[in-house]
Amino acid sequence: MARRRKTTLSHRMEYCAARVFQALICASPAAFSRETGAFLGGFAFSPLHIRRDVTMDHLRGALGEELNEEELVRIARESYRNFGRMTFEFARFPRLTPRRVKEMVSLTGAEHLDRALGKGKGAILVAGHLGNWEYMATLPMMGYPMTFLVGEQHNILVDGLMNMMRARFGGEIVPVTGSLRGIFRAVRDNRVVMMLSDQDAGRRGTFVEFFGRQASTPYGSGRLAAATGAALLPGTVVGRGGGHHEIVISPAVEPPLDGNDSDEAARYYTQAYTREFEAFIRSDPDQYFWMHRRWKTRPPGE
């Protein structure tokens, strides 16, 4: 059961500001709003230097042996610009019509989803903070029954606004808190359960290798796959320029040969999709959300 949250005066003020912000963006031409978002993102990188040190440390640790400092700075700046751009694109979701979605969003790897759902056991689509991940919400318009597992915002009014925009394409929204029953029901109904699973999970996560370092990672998707037999598929959304986006779905992770130990099976799945997601990032590193403290939690004894 989701926890009850109170609405405060500051929440109402934030919500009103968000609606005004969204109205202005929706009233602007799409290209102009994208470039405005990119400009503001770049401004946050320099001169504001918001989390710039964190971002550069992450890039040096992940790609420093392959790229020089100038290249890393370029990737970092573009990462900020991408985040600004995707924020403005998300705000424009109310303007997206089925025809516009068809023009803007393509799907690669649909056969993997079709194969998974053909088995009648549902599917688990695991993505991360790469490109504009919010465009995963358009998959129901392509014929896929989707249940989206989403985190909850502190401001319940803003949270409701964001989920309304995600659900407008036909998907079901299930909050992370108290989500277990809804997730198992979705799998039983042969739906695709989609979740983001690439951020630091603290002491509750399982440690897997990510860019050569151990990283605490949510393992709920792996445990769900082990418990239900549903296929687990890594996926991502990559910006292709000019407001066009490609949803990419990889083949399902092969189940472990020995599935008796649920903890080991969950860790196996988690490592497998994390490895695939690292490959996505290496292909488009300037679209990854490097600002998050991905390696904050360290293994015991390190």
Image (cartoon, rainbow, N blue to C red):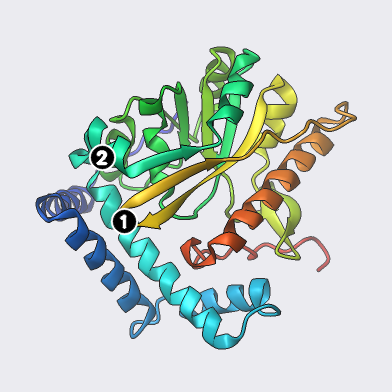
The residue labelled by disc 1 is: 87
Q: Which mark is residue 132?
A: none
Q: Earlier in the sequence, mark 1 or mark 2?
A: 1
Please provide percent x and percent y for residue 288: 50, 61
Amino acid, disc 1: Thr
Please tell me whether mark 1 or mark 2 is closer to you in this view: 1
The residue labelled by disc 2 is: 161
* Residue 220: quadrant of the picture: top right
- Alpha-carbon distance for marks 1 and 2? 14 Å
* Residue 144: quadrant of the picture: top left
Q: Residue at x 55, y 79 (%)?
A: 72
Please provide percent x and percent y for residue 111: 58, 28
* Quarter of the C terminus within the rendering: bottom right
Q: Residue at x 77, y 33 (%)?
A: 254
Label 2: state its secondary structure: helix
Q: Residue at x 41, y 40 (%)?
A: 106
* 264 horizontally vs 61: left or right: right
Label 1: state its secondary structure: helix
Q: Residue at x 12, y 52 (%)?
A: 20
Amino acid, disc 2: Leu
Q: Is residue 16 above or below residue 290?
A: above
